[in-house]
Amino acid sequence: MNQEAVRPARQDSSEQTSHSSSSEGQISQLSSSNNSENSTFWMSLLHANISWIKQIPAINTLSSRDKVILVERSWCPIMTIAVAQMSLSFDVDIIMNSYTPLDENDRRAVLSELRRMSQCVNSLRELSLGLHGYAAIKSLCLFTSGTAELEGHQMIANLTHMAREMVLENIDQLTANRCLELLPNIQSVAPESIERLLLSNIDAAKTAISETFLAAQEE
């Protein structure tokens, strides 16, 4: 097994590419949108990211349980990277003001995580990774979310190594090192807070993740 196993069959999903121009205006106008419309957009972006993950050949060698767990653990960092890649407007104040107010404790927690996410987005944009670079770092995010309790933990460890090699192959050394330094910050954004803010119907999101890969089990 070589790096082709962790490289998506298409370097980016057509769904994400199509969003890059049509959705930027929608996100930059969050203050005038309602919560339902915002959630619809982020659910659409979540689906696009899942479609992108399904293009990675190695994902189809894993059990359905392992697939679902990997995606549930990595969707938030992968979405963060996608926002940077697509150059979407990400104004923390506008996003916070566009959603139904939370109680003060929750609001502070969500705001803190949203700012962390924004910092990661801005740091990634400064690196100018390009298509192949973004694909490599998203693949690495996916497989580094695995842990020893997964059925295919040894294979996932090998895939993590291959994804790291792909990062080093597709990005110059200095930028690659910076990406690897950023990775823990990207993965540290608390998905629970982002779920409440960006994906108000998170039960639907989790169902979408599960159904996407349950279908693969039947193929």
Image (cartoon, helix red, strand yellow):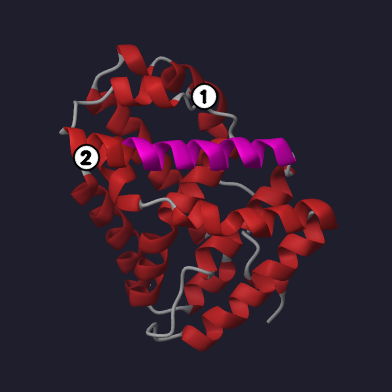
191 up-or-down from 197: above or below: below
Image check: 15 left or right of 166?
Answer: left
**For residue 117, which numbered disc appears in the image?**
none
Is residue 113 in the magenta section?
Answer: yes
Whether residue 173 is visible to the viewer of this picture, yes or no, is: yes
Q: In which quarter of the image is residue 214?
A: bottom left
Q: Residue at x 51, y 63 (%)?
A: 142
Q: Which of marks 2 and 1 is nearer the N terminus?
A: 1
Q: Give the range drawn in magenta.
A: 111-127
Q: Quadrant of the C terminus?
A: bottom left
> Which residue sits at x=42%, y=54%?
75
Q: Which of 152 and 93 is in front in this view?
A: 93
Q: Position of residue 32 (x, y in %)?
A: 31, 11
What amino acid is found at the position of numbered circle 1 in the picture?
Ser
Identify the residue position indicated by label 1 in the image: 89
Tell me which amino acid carries mark 2: Asp
